[in-house]
Image (cartoon, rainbow, N blue to C red):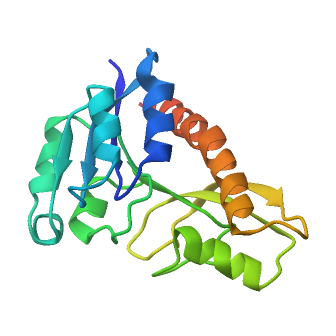
Amino acid sequence: MKKRIAIFASGSGSNAQKIMEHFKKSDEAEVAIVLSNNPEAYVLQRADNFEIPTHIFDRTEFRDTDEIIKILKNLQIDLIVLAGFLWLIPKNLLEAFPNKIINIHPSLLPAYGGKGMYGDYVHKSVLANKDPESGITIHFVNEHFDEGEIIYQAKFRIEPNDDLEMIKFKGQQLEHLHFPRIIENLLKKMKSNL
């Protein structure tokens, strides 16, 4: 039986796209659903292109009901992947899927983590502080922004003439390269622990 992945995303979904591509031909796992809190998110179109079902929810459904959990349990989801999802995960979801929710962050955590630190806000901070390097962090999700156990980090050098777009590009290259692979490794580990 294939392992089943649920992706949560709020925006364009370039990481979600890479994950969908990666598992499209896999015998081991599949993306079973894409969920978003943004009805305008381009990630929904990307999911549609792969014929993957989607679900759009609002803050009330997410925070105050068990509807999302029911959907995920019905689909027998093994791993929840946050790919550019900006809301804090509520306690009931964390408890329903312990150590089965992961996120990707565009910095070398613990640097530039926490509420409001995402996307360009992270890269602008890195630039402002003239950091010699930055990178990505893939981590488990807990009840705090960007504080869960780190699974994997990858770094890139920042050259003196790198601007915001270049830093963003270098970070995205690493995200697209490593995120699908790390997800696959985690799912293999889950399989061997059965």
- Relative to the observer, which residue lies in front, 65 or 188? 65
Residue 167 screen position, x and y as percent: 72, 62
Which residue is nearer to you in this view: 63 or 59? 59
Q: Is residue 177 left or right of residue 16?
A: right
Describe residue 54's horizontal placement relative to residue 187 as left or right. left
- Which of the 4 image quarters holds residue 191? top left
Measured from the top left, where is residue 13 in percent x and y? 42, 48
Determine whether 109 is above or below 152 in the image. Answer: below
Q: Is residue 135 visible?
A: no
Relative height, residue 117 to residue 30 (above, below): below
Seen at 26% across and 70% down, the residue is: 91
> Residue 160's x, y, as percent?
91, 70
At x 33% / y 26%, what residue is drawn?
A: 50
| Count of picture labels | 0
Q: Residue at x 57, y 71 (%)?
A: 120
Please state if 117 lies on the left or on the right of 96 as rendered.
right
Q: Quadrant of the N terminus?
A: top left
Q: Based on the displayed image, in which of its 4 quarters is residue 181 positioned?
A: top right
Q: Which residue lies furthest to the right in this view?
A: 160
